[in-house]
Image (tube, rainbow, N blue to C red):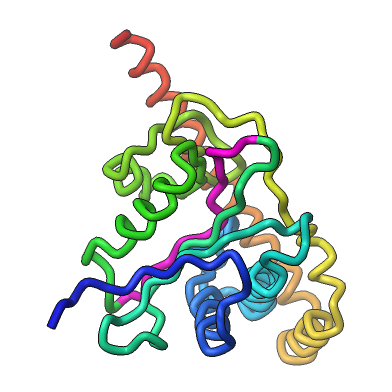
Amino acid sequence: MSNVPTITHYNRPPPGVILDQLVEMTGENLTSLGTRAVPFSNELFPLYQATLAIEVGQYLASMGYSPERCSEVIVATEPSKPSQVIGYLLYQPLAGVADACGVSYMIVRASNRRQGIGRLMIHEMLARYPHAELSCFVEKVPVYEAMGFQVIGYRETQVRMNTRDHTAEGVMAVLNVAEIYQMPQVLAIHQGLLQKHGRKALVNAERKIERQVEQIKRKVVAFVNERMATATSTE
């Protein structure tokens, strides 16, 4: 029996059993997916976890229905269990540029990593949109370089990478994440954390996140500047 995962492309919302797993996987991998890299030990982790899961859920649920959330997703499932998700790649085609897209999130279950699943999903995406851009933490740069991406700059805490040496001119439709923080279920989570930890603890937790973000930003800037200087010197 083949161990090659089944790769499925969706431009409409996936079946519920698939969609639910994608949202669950998102929350489980907040630290590696979220741009703020919030650790599990931080008191605000449940809040950031919920907002990221809701964000991905909204992208998935509105696929094919909302021009403001024009998304597609590639899903990897177990070959012998078509309803068992082992990875996904969520991206947005760029409006006005037929061959370009921007990657929002990609994750592979921990038990299925180092099996080439991410490469399979990227390959499927590039077959549709060869001009692709993504952002990742410094540690992931070699992984994406091996898939044909190159460093072109940085954005906040992450390195910007592209299959070409420039960003496509099209517009990437993204959600207003600030609105998610005002949703009743998210406000309820925040209120629960206040009751559990107290306001002072949550303020300190946010300060810890901000300090970490600043550290990561400095690391990213130094990395990209060094990489760009090296590239210039070899031209």
In the rendered image, is residue 174 in sight? yes
Residue 3: percent from left, percent from top: 18, 77
Residue 206: percent from left, percent from top: 70, 65
Front residue (pair 123, 45): 123
Q: Which residue occupies 60% across, 48% down?
A: 93
Q: As displayed, is residue 176 above or below residue 96? A: below
Q: Which residue occupies 51% across, 46% down?
A: 135
Helix, strand or loop for the magenta stretch, by majority: strand
- Range of magenta residues: 97-110
Q: As displayed, is residue 26 above or below residue 142? A: below
Quarter of the rendering containing residue 48: bottom right
Residue 123: percent from left, percent from top: 35, 51
Q: As displayed, is residue 144 above or below residue 178? A: above
Q: Is residue 195 left or right of residue 92?
A: right
Q: Is residue 55 left or right of residue 93?
A: right
Say if the magenta span includes residue 226.
no
